[in-house]
Amino acid sequence: MKTIQLNNGIEIPSPGLGTYRLGRNDEEVYRAVRHAIEIGYRHIDSAAFYDNEKPVGRAIRESKVPREDLFVTTKLWGSDIVGKRIEKAFEESMHRLDVGYIDLFLVHWPVNGMIVTTWREMERIYHSGRVKAIGVSNHLIHHLDMLLKEAEIIPAVNQVELHPYLVMQELQHYCQEKGIVIESWSPLGSSKIPLLADAVIGKIAMQKGKSTAQVILRWNLQKQLIPLPKSTDWQRQLENIAIFDFSLTSDEVAGIDRLDRHQRTGVHPDEITF
Ligand code: A2P
């Protein structure tokens, strides 16, 4: 597993395992995370909203991998921001995960009018020593501009929907310039768009003897993006981390960049309400 250094010196493993709608029940989540850790995943991405912190935490505790070798993310949900219960929500996530500390705590979505006050609370939680790093998710440039004007701590991470049909080039440049690492959610386009059937990526995959998914995940790595693919299928979990024995040329990376259609599978960050 590769690691990338965050802006506060913490190392974050890449890829991570996405867990949104991973499995139909707690047992499936537990089994998927347990298996992922067994085969080499060291970074698990969870969230209060996913309602899976308990089985994720249990899989981490019961794995044979020392806690300090694993990287655990969870996220603060918008209604906890609106309801002014950020500290309480954080404590509840800590309790459900029960893994001692959290590596990365993210603001799940920007809440209009509350971006700066939320970030102050995040900074306070960071200073309390219960998380190794703080960041945001689904924040666009105008959200980050607002936050950075008042921030004492620069977010370590911005986790956004990102894949070859939604490349977010400007946001990538912006975050790179500010020292914010981007994580890609739904890096394979979820099941909502036929990204895995793309002919351009398929051709590269065939030439390399790799799958389309592997080429997309490798494209993430070479762009210093941290992909968070999810799968309950053990074979696919393995496939999604077997991406260190080949590379893409700069022309191939640029060719995949050009597939951008600004196509979202999820909600636009300016349109979410709580
Ligand atoms: P499954 O759990 O059945 O493997 P996302 O882009 O949001 O991470 O979603 C990826 C979706 O594609 C998941 O629903 C997952 O379903 C499936 N998937 C994950 N890895 C692969 C892969 N290597 N090849 C094909 N489909 C995949």
Image: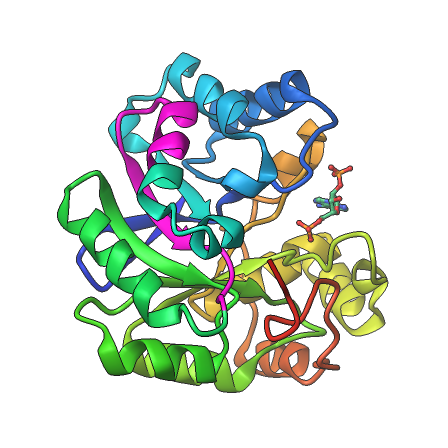
Question: Which quadrant of the figure contains the C terminus?
Answer: bottom right
Where in the figure is residue 222, as x and y percent of width and height?
47, 67
Q: Magenta span has 102?
A: yes
Above or below: residue 63 compared with residue 185: above
Which of 3/271 is in front? 271
Judged from the image, the quadrant occupied by ligand 1 is top right
The mark total stands at 0
Q: Residue at x 61, y 48 (%)?
A: 229
Q: Residue at x 70, y 29 (%)?
A: 23
Above or below: residue 258 compared with residue 69: below
Where in the figure is residue 46, as x and y percent of width and height?
50, 39
Above or below: residue 37 compared with residue 7: above
Q: Residue at x 32, y 83 (%)?
A: 177
Where in the figure is residue 174, as x and y percent of width and height?
40, 84
Which colouring convention does the figure follow? rainbow
Please give the range of residues in magenta.
91-111
Q: Magenta span has 100?
A: yes
Q: Is residue 80 visible?
A: yes
Which of 166/223 is in front? 166
User: Which residue in the rendered view is the most extreme toward the front?
Assistant: 83
Above or below: residue 144 compared with residue 190: below
Residue 241 is left or right of residue 204, and the answer is: left
Give the image quarter of residue 9: bottom left
Which of 229/178 is in front? 178
Q: Residue at x 63, y 36 (%)?
A: 237
Where in the figure is residue 158, as x and y percent of width and height?
43, 65
Q: Is residue 156 visible?
A: no
Question: Which quadrant of the figure contains the N terminus?
Answer: top left
Residue 24 is left or right of residue 257, and the answer is: right
